[in-house]
């Protein structure tokens, strides 16, 4: 349900011709990177960078144009953590669950966040504002525990300070 | 830009740029007021940037402009200088004065006080954690003083976005020497002589590895750089890529020349490091412009190109065959070796894959000679190694030391020990593939063989320090969660074995462990290590096996005493009231020896007349449990001749078991009474007519308890396997003892 609502939201904001534009852009990416060794992963990375996630129609277009079976494309998408077939919120919250963050209270931070936004990891709020995910080590271990919101790294986050951080994102 | 074609060209650039950088070698801070040149170096590594060094950089630029200092003061952004704990870091030359945890608001104070006044801003200087003494010059801080920086020697000292600053520090001189003055075989020999071993963790001699690829038949070969630094808790490769990218490019180009028939290299960098990818891309572009990459490098006719391949977030892609699959655009599944990548690697062509740190060592080995390199470190373990000190340690960051340095020196002298005066317990080395080194082995020298001898591995160099508050069972469980997630699923031992190991650990951490589990862990772990396909599976049991080896007593405490000594494993936590703190809220339980749940129950019985005491009446046990027990006896001992007794007791027992398990309904209570009455009336002998009596009377007198089992799914005495009550010092008013039912309620209160 959530996913449908968000797709509808994206379509509404994208305006007329949204689906067509996505299709065109996907094809342009394929054209630009085509022929290169390992093109598939690069195409997927760029497509996701543009659309935010990889809905089935995009995968089908990629499969057809690169002449790679859809099953194989899906195999790649599901293998690498970087790819997602679920749309993401406006602000993506990432909680680091690397070792350093874990020993310094990353789990507690995640638990607090789950409650604060009412989400399980990989979920998104119904208004599309936040989505929550966990990552394995952002390499900012000296700043543990770390979370990022929309790409901004927040360091040494105390569970008590979570709401204040989230309130900065409208 | 003119292409560089000879050593003389390089010398020319160096002669032009180096004088401008000399100020960064001037340790005399007293001249700051009259110094003709002042450099303000701002760390823009990921750590410091996250801490706000971007704003600090802007503020400095503004301040310089406002004060009309443009001609004299340069504001330069550098790569990571490894002191991430105290970021944002700002270093001012002349003097090498380090300011830590600088914010944009502090900038004007630094400019006025230090630049104009010649006085340090005391409050921003670094203070040694033990003595509290302020140390202004960074080269005098213990953290830096006790290191030997070879790989990291330019990190934090040059602008990683400027190739000229790299050249000014003899950059690309190693490449020029190799291409213009040495045969490929001579380069190989030099690397062999240096004794450098793979810095990715396995420690295979790099010279030998290159030799294999060199002698493998093939017209097309590849060199690859492994920047898929997936070990949680390790970020030294990222620091090199962000702080000194040209050293990696130069190293790869030298490698390509030495191996021969190589025209293409790939740098595989994980997507979680966007800044590293950006810095590296820029460096590759610059190197191409100057003629260090591309066609006809340095006018020698040697062609070589490097492409960056951004990883897509899969830990297993750090394994060489998986990484090559990934570049080919496929799932990163490892494959059986042999054939080794030296013969059949990327696109089935001979390939060598080396770690970022290995590559960045190569230029200096060629320039200064293999003998120079092998004079550093210990025999068989030459050179330096970078380590990431993280976790419960005062000076988190990157430390580089010669191999063979004692672990003790690394953690206490450089790292400054554990914060808050806590006791050091163990250090995890080698990430999810490694193991722990406990305090009693802290005198071990850090080299490949000694670390392996203790059941850990060197790995890429992440050191996660743990203090007395960390539970070893929990840490082992954490790592297995990681490897389980990251297993590619191709081979069974890894795919099926790791979840089994984790299941056993979960059982132990929840107090359901058995003594046999310890042997089972060892046996299963050994099996997974032996028969898995790739390095991920082969090393995945290491955290379990090594914690088991060094902290067996902690496992036993979980299993035998049902106690987690550190209090990390939540289901095993025993809460107790603090005698001196408890004033009185609902219950006054002051005056008894703190001793966990049982003792509190006893205290409740002793101190509180009335409701509480009645509820726990049947010898402190649970009425539902008692009813179930009595009904079991009745059902088992009946002769079975008459139906009401035979069938009725069985049915009553079933319902009581449901209630005890938390599956009861209120209707069952009425049904129990009805059925009990029926049995009483209709049974043939006195055994039957009295069989239901105890249960009926229990329901009559303790209906509350039955309802609590049914409605709240809670057993007040904790005998039924329902969520327990927890008693703890009230989180709101520490002077008060509070009671929580079940873990959910407790967790809510704890946050």
Image (cartoon, rainbow, N blue to C red):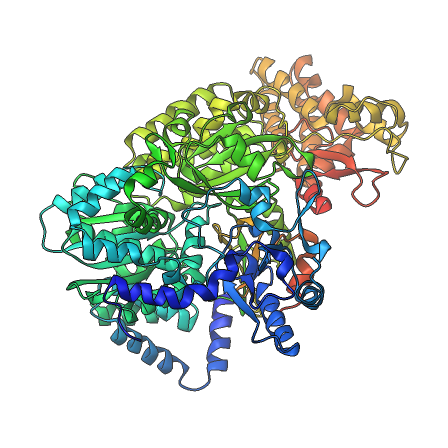
Residue A17 is left or right of residue A108, and the answer is left
Q: Pick whichever, B671 or B226, lies toward us.
A: B226
Write the residue at 87% across / 30% down. Answer: B580
The relative height of residue B549 versus residue B531 in the rendered view (above or below) is: above
Number of numbered discs visible in the structure rendering:
0
Residue B383: percent from left, percent from top: 37, 39
**x and y percent of residue B502 in the render?**
46, 34
Q: Is residue B491 visible?
A: no
Residue B254 sits in which quadrant? bottom left
Name the foreground residue: B253 vs A37: B253
Residue B604 horizontal side relative to residue B358, left or right: right
Q: Nearer the viewer, residue B331 or B145?
A: B145
Query: In the rendered view, would you say B590 is above or below A161?
Result: above
Residue B106: x %, y % from top left: 69, 64
Q: At 61% from the left edge and 45% from the top edge, which residue is drawn?
A: A105
Task: Indicate the quadrant containing the C terminus of chain A: top left, top right, bottom left or bottom right.
Answer: bottom right
Is B297 positioned to the left or the right of B46 in the image? left
- Residue B540 in the image: above or below residue A51: above
Q: Name the residue nearer the viewer: B555 or B397.
A: B397
Residue B468, percent from left and from top:
63, 31
Relative horizontal placement of residue B603, taking residue B46 as reference (left or right): right
- Residue at point 24% right, 43% down? B190
């Amino acid at each position: 349900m959530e996913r449908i609502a968000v797709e509808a939201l994206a379509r509404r904001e994208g305006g007329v011709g949204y689906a067509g534009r996505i299709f065109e852009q996907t094809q342009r990416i394929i054209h630009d990177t085509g022929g290169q060794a390992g093109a598939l992963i690069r195409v997927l990375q760029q497509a996701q960078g543009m659309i935010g996630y990889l809905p089935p129609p995009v995968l089908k277009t990629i499969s057809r144009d690169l002449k790679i079976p859809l099953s194989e494309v899906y195999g790649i998408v599901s293998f690498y953590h970087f790819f997602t077939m679920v749309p993401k919120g406006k602000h993506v919250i990432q909680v680091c669950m690397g070792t350093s963050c874990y020993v310094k209270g990353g789990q507690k931070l995640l638990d607090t966040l789950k409650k604060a936004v009412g989400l399980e990891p990989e979920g998104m709020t119904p208004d599309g504002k936040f989505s929550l995910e966990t990552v394995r080590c952002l390499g900012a271990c000296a700043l543990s525990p770390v979370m990022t919101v929309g790409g901004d790294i927040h360091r040494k986050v105390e569970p008590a300070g979570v709401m204040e951080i989230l309130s900065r994102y409208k | 830009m003119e292409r560089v074609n000879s050593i003389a060209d390089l010398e020319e650039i160096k002669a032009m740029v180096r004088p401008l950088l000399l100020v960064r070698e001037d340790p005399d801070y007293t001249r700051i007021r009259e110094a003709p040149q002042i450099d303000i170096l701002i760390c823009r590594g990921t750590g410091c940037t996250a801490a706000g060094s971007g704003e600090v950089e802007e503020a400095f630029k503004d301040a310089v402009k406002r004060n009309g200092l443009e001609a004299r003061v340069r504001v330069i952004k550098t790569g990571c200088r490894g002191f991430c704990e105290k970021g944002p870091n700002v270093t001012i030359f002349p003097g090498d004065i380090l300011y830590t945890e600088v914010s944009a608001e502090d900038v004007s104070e630094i400019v006025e006080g230090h630049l104009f006044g010649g006085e340090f801003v005391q409050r921003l200087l670094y203070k040694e954690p033990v003595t509290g003494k302020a140390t202004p010059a960074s080269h005098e801080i213990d953290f830096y003083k006790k290191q030997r920086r070879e790989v990291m020697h330019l990190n934090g000292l040059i602008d990683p976005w400027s190739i000229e600053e790299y050249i000014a520090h003899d950059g690309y001189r190693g490449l020029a020497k190799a291409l213009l003055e040495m045969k490929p075989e001579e380069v190989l020999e030099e690397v062999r002589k240096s004794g450098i071993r793979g810095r990715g963790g396995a420690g295979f001699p790099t010279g030998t590895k290159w030799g294999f690829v060199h002698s493998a038949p093939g017209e097309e070969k590849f060199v690859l750089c492994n920047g898929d630094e997936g070990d949680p808790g390790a970020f030294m490769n990222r620091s090199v890529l962000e702080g000194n990218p040209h050293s990696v490019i130069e190293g790869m180009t030298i490698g390509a020349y030495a191996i021969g028939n190589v025209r293409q290299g790939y740098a595989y960098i994980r997507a979680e490091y966007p800044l590293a990818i950006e810095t590296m891309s820029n460096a590759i572009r610059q190197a191409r412009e100057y003629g260090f990459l591309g066609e006809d490098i340095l006018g020698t006719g040697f062609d070589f190109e490097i492409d960056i391949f951004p990883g897509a977030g899969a830990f297993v892609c750090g394994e060489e065959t998986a990484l090559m699959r990934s570049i080919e655009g496929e799932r990163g599944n490892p494959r059986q070796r042999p054939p080794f990548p030296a013969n059949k690697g990327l696109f089935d062509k001979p390939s060598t894959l080396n770690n970022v740190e290995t590559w960045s060592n190569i230029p200096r080995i060629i320039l200064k000679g293999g003998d120079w390199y092998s004079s550093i470190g210990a025999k068989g373990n030459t050179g330096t190694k970078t380590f990431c000190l993280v976790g419960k340690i005062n000076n988190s960051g990157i430390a580089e030391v010669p191999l063979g340095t004692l672990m003790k020196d690394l953690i206490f002298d450089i790292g400054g020990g554990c914060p808050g005066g806590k006791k050091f317990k163990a250090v995890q080395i080698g990430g999810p593939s490694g193991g722990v080194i406990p305090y009693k082995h802290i005198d071990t020298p850090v080299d490949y063989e000694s670390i392996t001898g203790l059941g850990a591995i060197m790995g890429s160099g992440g050191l996660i320090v743990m203090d007395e508050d960390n539970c070893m069972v929990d840490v082992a469980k954490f790592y297995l969660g990681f490897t389980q997630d990251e297993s590619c699923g191709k081979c069974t031992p890894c795919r099926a074995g790791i979840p089994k190991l984790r299941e056993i650990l979960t059982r132990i951490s929840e107090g359901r462990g058995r003594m046999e589990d310890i042997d089972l862990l060892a046996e299963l772990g050994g099996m997974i290590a032996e028969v898995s396909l790739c390095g991920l599976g082969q090393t995945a049991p290491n955290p379990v096996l090594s914690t088991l080896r060094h902290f067996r007593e902690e496992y036993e405490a979980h299993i035998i005493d049902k106690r987690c000594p550190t209090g990390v494993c939540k289901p095993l936590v025993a809460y107790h009231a603090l005698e001196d703190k408890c004033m009185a809220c609902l219950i006054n339980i002051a005056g008894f020896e703190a001793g966990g749940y049982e003792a509190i129950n006893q205290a409740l019985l002793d101190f509180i007349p009335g409701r509480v005491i009645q509820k726990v009446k049947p010898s402190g046990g649970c009425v539902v449990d008692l009813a179930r027990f009595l009904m079991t006896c009745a059902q088992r001992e009946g002769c079975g001749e008459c139906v009401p007794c035979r069938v009725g007791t069985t049915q009553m027992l079933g319902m009581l078991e449901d209630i005890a398990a938390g599956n009861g309904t209120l209707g069952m209570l009425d049904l129990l009474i009805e059925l009990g009455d029926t049995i009483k009336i209709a049974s043939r002998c006195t055994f039957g007519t009295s069989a239901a009596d105890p249960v009926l009377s229990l329901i009559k007198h303790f209906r509350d308890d039955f309802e609590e089992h049914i409605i709240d799914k809670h057993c007040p005495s904790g005998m039924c396997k329902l969520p327990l009550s927890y008693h703890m010092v009230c989180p709101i008013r520490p002077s008060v003892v509070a009671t929580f039912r079940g873990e959910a309620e407790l967790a809510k209160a704890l946050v």
